[in-house]
Image (tube, rainbow, N blue to C red):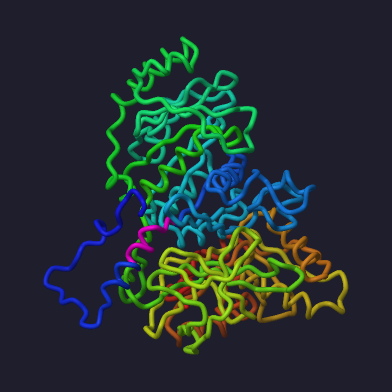
Amino acid sequence: MCPICYSSLLGTTAGAPAPIHTNRKAMTHQSDQVSRRRTFAIISHPDAGKTTLTEKLLLFGGAIQLAGAVKARGDARRARSDWMKVEQERGISVTASVMTFEYGECTLNLLDTPGHEDFSEDTYRTLTAVDSAIMVIDAAKGIETQTRKLFEVCRLRNVPIITFINKLDREGRDPFELMSEIEQDLQLHVTPVSWPIGMGHDFLGCYDLLHDRLVLMDRGRRNVVSHGESCHGLDDPKLDEMLPEGAVARLRESAEMARGLCPPFRLEDYREGHLTPVFFGSALNNFGVRELLDGLVELAPPPRPQKTETREVRPEEENVTGFVFKIQANMDPKHRDRVAFVRLCSGRFERGMKLKHIRSGKTMAIHNPLLFMARDRELAEEAWAGDILGLPNHGVLRIGDALTEGEDLRFTGIPSFAPELLKKVRTADPMKAKHLGRALLQLAEEGAAQIFRPRIGNDWIVGVAGALQFDVLADRIRTEYNVDVLFEGTSLYTARWLEAAEPMLKKFMNANSGTLAEDHNGSPVFLARNAWHLKSTGEDWPEVKFLTTKEQVQ
């Protein structure tokens, strides 16, 4: 069992009768399995060290033996989680990836998210599938724009956050200054659970304030796990033997000051989203990574209840439920595959079982469910609440779809956002226009971009959150679909989804057909030429809502 016993968190409803046919042994086994799960994301501003930290968590978890290790020797410098060709070429993460690995008695599901703000929508959706998050902060830069945006998304969903202040092997800001910035900017209580010893060239390691111990790492063997030596307590004479005299004095003084100035750590405050425990370290040099991983297992919540339109689904329920939060096509170009990522919310899933696809009302037999290690995959014989499954399919599943054992549930909180940039797209070869249409629809169903087809004309309009997405889309369409495309500017300002009573919506659409389009789901969209056009149309049609976000409830 994990250090935090899940059974103490569930509680019981007073006076509720026990189910007549409950198999107590099976229920205990399910509770144990659920309590072992930790499903979390890593969020950060670009270049804060998120991908490096991901690699090191996998390294310390035993999922890989060498950081960056892949089968081909020449690929050893590439990140395991950055599996797409464009990610490897550019050195950035542009899509969320899922990695499942064991650590101690627990099963960890790590969702690595894009750090670049141009790919923020994929990150927002990924955060709907996690129970906690690790926020990575560069010690020299502190809180940056994208970090703040992603934190706000976590706050909206009450996702508990552990903070990892990274790159202590470089000169950075004072730890007290960084913690004060987190407290002031994010309105969070801050409690350090580890404390850095030195900084830059003088950085020697971190002291574990929760367990009163010190583990030093070998800087020269940064790609290999080293267990080091442990000390117990700040007054342990062993500290004087292991550290330089000045470093020991500074550690004892600053650590005691941190304990005195910061509130004591309370688990319930962290899990309710009011407090963030802070770890210091250097992912590149392994400093503080094991303590972070131990802290995640010990402190982070097991699977939490998930909201639907009608009720809350609890992880200990017997029936299987889950929702699709991501679609990824062509993870393996040899097979032209299409995988739906499903967050299991309750029950015990078994390979071969039949689940109801709520949007279509049809029953699906799940014969080839997958568990992931980035691009690597294996068949999942069983899975539990909190696990992330990959379901190969041919366009049947969409983002937001619910799968259950029969109950009509629709999960909420999975957003789409109105694009900030719009461009026309066409093929360099007109004979491949149909191929382009298929590629765009598949990319839209993935959530890689918003695709609009105007009611008048044959152009495709592509909407994205950031300019870099156009480059990535062009690259993916070329490499995955063998179609060369050109993106061209438009006079369009933005797009808004429409919502109104049926007679009013029909009247609006008849009167404004030249400015309307449909998205890949067939939903009506208003294309505004400029801010005045959007504002004046809204004033002329007060009964029509122009939506910047759209809930993907299927």
Name the residue: 61% across, 42% down.
52
Which sits in the foreground, 427 or 1?
A: 1
In percent of width and height, residue 149 lies at 49, 48
Which sits in the foreground, 151 or 21?
A: 21
Name the residue: 38% across, 71% down.
346
Rendered view: 53 above or below 310 = above
In percent of width and height, residue 436 lies at 77, 74
Residue 516 appearing in the image = no
Rendered view: 378 above or below 360 = above
The magenta-colored residue range is 30-38
In percent of width and height, residue 23 lies at 28, 77
Looking at this view, name the residue that lies furthest to the top: 245
Looking at this view, name the residue that lies furthest to the left: 15
Q: Left or right of 532: which side holds 343?
A: left
Whether the magenta-drawn stretch holds residue 131 is answered as: no
In percent of width and height, residue 75 lies at 76, 49
Q: The N terminus lies in which quarter of the figure?
A: bottom left
Name the residue: 58% across, 45% down.
59
Quadrant of the image occupied by residue 34: bottom left
Quadrant of the image occupied by residue 489: bottom right
Residue 401 appearing in the image = yes
Q: Left or right of 74: which side holds 40?
A: left
Q: Left or right of 279: which side holds 63?
A: right
